[in-house]
Amino acid sequence: DIELKGEGSGKSTALIVRRFLKKGWLPEHFMVTSFNFYELNDFHDALSHIPMGIIFDRLPIDYTLFAQQFGVQSIFMNYTLLTPSLMERANARGLVVFAWTVNKIMDAKKLVKLGVDGIVTDFPSKLVFQ
């Protein structure tokens, strides 16, 4: 995951990713994400075939429709916002769902049962469980 954070990061990251593509890396080796829709748009304008995801920290009216219309393949949600109905809507639109930032094993287990596709954590070794 490459998270775009600063002003101009969409364009500059596209230049770097393009170098890796020329070295033989495949588009699916990348996932570019951001809270900033403008930076994602700049990146998309430069490299539209690279998978992207939107990071949400609050719920828009219909985040799944918004994400689909924006052309991303995945959404990164604050784990406290995820519910069964949100997961159903995301899955119906073919979106991959990541939960962030999950640092407690009990929360991670609940999210796995909920059906998230991935978990973002500060402590990966702590969250390895059966």
Image (spheres, rainbow, N blue to C red):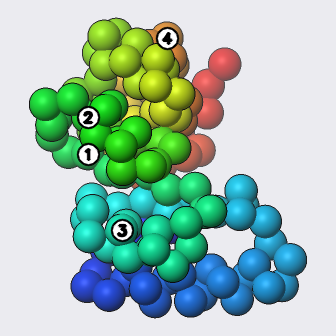
> In this view of the protein, can residue 103 be seen by the observer?
no
Front residue (pair 100, 59): 59
- Looking at the rendering, which quadrant does residue 117 occupy? top right
The answer for how far apart the CA atoms under marks 2 and 1 are is: 8 Å
Front residue (pair 74, 121): 74
Name the residue beneath numbered marker 4: 113
Whichever of labels 4 and 3 marks the residue nearer the N terminus, that label is 3
Q: Are marks 2 and 1 in contact (CB under 8 Å)?
A: yes
Q: Relative to residue 51, is residue 79 drawn left or right?
A: left
Q: Relative to residue 38, is residue 33 drawn left or right?
A: right
Q: Are marks 1 and 3 in contact (CB under 8 Å)?
A: no
Q: Residues within 10 Å of mark 3 (few under 14, many from 20)?
A: some
Q: Hey, what amino acid is under mark 2? A: Tyr
Quadrant, the C terminus: top right
The label nearer to you, 4 versus 1, is 1
Name the residue beneath numbered marker 3: 41
